[in-house]
C-alpha cells in the first residue's frame, strides 16, 4: 500500500504554486476503490473496474452449503476433517477482514489529511487553480462516502463470518466429541469381541478335551468288553481254528513218526541186501532225512574213527539215474541239508587208510512241513526282513553281538545295521547264495552270501525255518530276474 505523505505547502511562493498545474486525485489502492482521471476539457472520467471478485460472504455461504450438502455422505472422521477445514478457512477470512478494516482506517486518516491539505491550498490560491482544488475536494468527499459504505459492508461481513466461524467451531467440537464417543464404543465392542472369542476358544478346547477323554474311555471299555467276550467264548465254546490246529499238529507228529520208521526200515533193508552181497558198508548216515536237519557220518559198529585223517566229500544224486553232483566245500563229517537237497539222495564218500567207503541216505530228502506255503505267502510282499548275526566277513570272525537286518526284495538284497547299509546289491550272475557247508553247530541256521566279488558274509538266523525260507525266497526272486543263485563251485543249475 502506498502511503501519501503530507506536503508542506507553506514554504512555497505564489509563483511556484501557479507552476504546479492542476492537481490530480491520489490513486489509493487501485482495484479496491474507484479511480478517476482528467479527460479532455477538464472532465473527470471514472475508470472501469476490473473483473468482480466474489465477496467474502458469498464464499463462506458457498463453503457452508457444500458442507451441509455432503454431510449425509461423509463419515464421522471425514466430517470432522471438513469442519476443521471450514473452521480454518473462516479463521483466515476473519483475519483478512481484520486486515482490510485496518487498511480502511488507515485510508480514512489519509483522506482526512488530504482534505485538510486541499482546504489549506484553497485558501491560498485563486482562479483556475482554485476550481481544480474544489473539484479535488469533491472527489475526496465522494471517496470518503464510498469508503464509509465499504467499511459498513466489511463490518457486516465480519459479524457474519464471526457467527459462521463460531458455528463451525461448535460443529467441529461436536464432531470431535462424536468421534471420541464412536472410538470409545468401537474399542468397547472390540474388547467385548475379544472376550467372546476367548470364551469360545476355551469352550472349544474344553469340549475337545472332554471328547478325547470320553472317546478314550469308550475305546477302553470296548476293548475290555471284547476281551471279556473272547474269554467267555474260549471257556465255553472253543473255536474251530484251535481244533484244526490241534488236529494238524497231531497229524504232523504221526507223519514224522511214520517217516522215521520208514527210514529205519529202508536202512535195514539196504543193510540186508548188502549183507547178502557181502558188501556191508563201514559207515552210515545218521539223522532225519528232512530239510532243516543235519546228517552225521558214523561207523556202523560204533567203532571210533578219527576223521581228521580221512578225506570226505558230499554229493547230490538225482532220483532217476546215478548222476552225481558234487557239493563244493562240503568236506566235513557233518552236513546241514538245504533247499536244493530236497528230492535228491545225499551221499558221502570217505577215503581212509587207502580204502574208499560210501554212505548214502535211504531215500530222497523230504521237504519241511509247511515251508513251501510259508514262502508263497512271503512272495506276496515286496520285501521281507530277517534278523541275522554276521558270523564271518571275508572269512574273518566277527563279534557275537553283531546284529544286522537282511532285507530280501524282488530286485535286490540288502544288509544293514541300524541306518548304516553294509551291503546292497541287485541280483546278478556274480552273486552267490547257499547254506553253510563247513559243518559246525550253527550250520543248520547259517547261510553263505557273496553279494559281489571280494566281499562275502556268513549270516546266522534265529531258526532253521527262517534260514531255509530266506534261501528259497531269494532264489525265487532271482529266478524271476533270470538269475540262478548257487553256491561256490556249483556249475550245473538245478
Image (cartoon, rainbow, N blue to C red):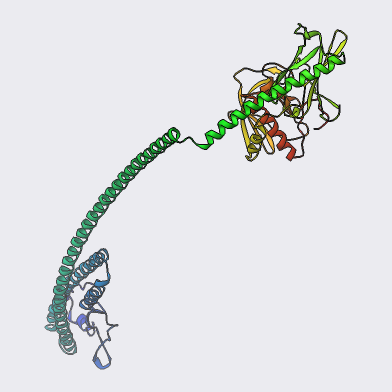
The residue at the point 43 percent across, 32 percent down is: 235
Quadrant in which the C terminus appears: top right
Q: Is residue 295 visible?
A: yes
In the displayed structure image, the side of residue 439 where residue 110 appears, left or right: left
Q: Is residue 197 above or below residue 382?
A: below
Tally of numbered discs: 0
**Foreground residue among 423 and 232:** 232
Q: Name, please, the residue furthest toward the bottom.
A: 41
The residue at the point 20 percent across, 81 percent down is: 17
Quadrant in which the N terminus appears: bottom left
Q: Is residue 177 above or below residue 376?
A: below
Q: Is residue 90 above or below residue 272?
A: below
Q: Position of residue 127 (x, y in %)?
A: 16, 90
**Foreground residue among 189 and 399:** 399
The residue at the point 24 percent across, 56 percent down is: 189
**Foreground residue among 494 and 138:** 494
Q: Is residue 313 visible?
A: no
Kindly indicate the quadrant of the structure image that contains residue 275: top right
Kindly indicate the quadrant of the structure image that contains residue 274: top right
Q: Position of residue 401 (x, y in %)?
A: 59, 19
Q: Is residue 334 above or below residue 182?
A: above
Q: Position of residue 279 (x, y in %)?
A: 86, 14
In the displayed structure image, the side of residue 144 where residue 34 appears, left or right: right
Q: Position of residue 393 (x, y in %)?
A: 69, 21
**Foreground residue among 200 and 476:** 476
Amino acid at each position: 500500500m502506498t502511503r501519501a505523505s503530507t506536503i508542506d505547502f507553506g514554504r512555497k511562493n505564489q509563483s511556484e504554486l501557479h507552476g504546479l498545474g492542476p492537481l490530480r486525485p491520489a490513486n489509493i489502492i487501485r482495484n479496491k476503490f474507484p479511480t478517476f482521471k482528467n479527460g479532455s476539457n477538464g472532465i473527470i472520467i471514472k475508470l472501469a473496474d476490473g473483473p468482480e471478485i466474489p465477496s467474502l460472504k458469498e464464499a463462506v455461504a458457498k463453503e457452508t452449503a457444500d458442507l451441509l450438502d455432503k454431510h449425509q455422505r461423509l463419515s464421522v472422521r471425514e466430517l470432522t476433517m471438513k469442519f476443521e477445514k471450514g473452521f480454518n478457512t473462516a479463521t483466515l477470512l476473519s483475519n483478512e477482514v481484520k486486515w482490510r478494516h485496518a487498511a480502511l482506517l488507515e485510508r480514512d486518516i489519509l483522506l482526512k489529511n488530504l482534505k485538510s491539505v486541499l482546504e489549506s491550498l484553497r485558501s491560498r490560491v485563486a482562479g483556475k487553480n482554485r476550481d481544480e482544488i474544489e473539484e479535488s475536494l469533491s472527489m475526496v468527499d465522494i471517496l470518503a462516502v464510498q469508503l464509509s459504505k465499504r467499511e459498513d459492508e466489511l463490518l457486516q461481513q465480519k459479524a457474519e463470518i464471526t457467527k459462521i466461524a463460531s458455528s463451525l467451531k461448535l460443529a467441529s467440537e461436536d464432531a470431535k466429541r462424536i468421534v471420541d464417543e464412536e472410538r470409545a464404543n468401537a474399542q468397547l465392542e472390540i474388547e467385548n469381541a475379544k472376550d467372546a472369542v476367548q470364551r469360545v476358544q476355551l469352550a472349544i478346547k474344553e469340549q475337545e478335551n472332554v471328547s478325547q477323554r470320553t472317546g478314550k474311555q469308550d475305546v477302553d471299555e470296548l476293548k475290555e468288553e471284547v476281551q471279556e467276550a473272547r474269554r467267555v467264548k474260549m471257556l465255553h465254546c472253543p473255536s474251530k481254528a484251535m481244533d484244526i490246529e490241534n488236529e494238524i499238529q497231531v497229524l504232523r507228529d504221526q507223519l514224522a513218526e511214520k517217516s522215521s520208521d520208514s527210514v529205519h526200515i529202508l536202512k535195514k533193508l539196504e543193510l540186508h541186501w548188502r549183507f547178502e552181497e557181502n558188501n556191508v558198508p563201514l559207515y552210515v548216515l545218521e539223522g532225519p532225512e528232512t530239510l532243516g536237519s543235519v546228517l552225521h557220518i558214523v561207523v556202523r559198529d560204533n567203532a571210533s574213527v578219527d576223521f581228521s585223517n580221512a578225506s570226505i566229500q558230499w554229493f547230490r544224486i538225482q532220483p532217476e539215474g546215478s548222476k552225481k553232483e558234487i557239493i563244493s566245500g562240503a568236506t566235513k563229517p557233518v552236513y546241514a541239508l538245504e533247499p536244493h537237497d530236497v528230492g535228491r539222495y545225499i551221499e558221502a564218500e570217505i577215503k581212509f587208510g587207502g580204502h574208499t567207503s560210501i554212505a548214502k541216505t535211504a531215500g530222497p530228502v523230504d521237504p519241511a512241513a509247511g515251508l513251501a506255503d510259508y514262502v508263497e505267502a512271503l512272495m506276496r510282499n515286496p520285501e521281507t526282513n530277517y534278523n541275522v548275526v554276521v558270523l564271518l566277513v571275508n572269512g574273518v570272525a566277527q563279534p557275537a553281538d553283531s546284529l544286522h537286518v537282511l532285507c530280501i526284495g524282488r530286485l535286490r538284497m540288502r544288509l544293514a545295521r541300524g541306518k548304516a547299509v553294509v551291503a546292497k546289491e541287485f541280483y546278478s550272475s556274480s552273486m552267490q547264495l547257499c547254506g553253510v557247508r563247513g559243518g559246525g553247530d550253527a550250520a543248520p541256521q547259517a547261510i553263505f552270501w557273496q553279494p559281489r566279488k571280494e566281499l562275502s558274509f556268513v549270516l546266522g538266523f534265529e531258526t532253521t525255518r527262517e534260514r531255509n525260507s530266506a534261501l528259497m525266497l531269494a532264489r525265487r526272486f532271482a529266478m524271476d530276474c533270470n538269475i540262478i543263485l548257487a553256491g561256490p563251485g556249483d556249475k550245473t543249475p538245478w
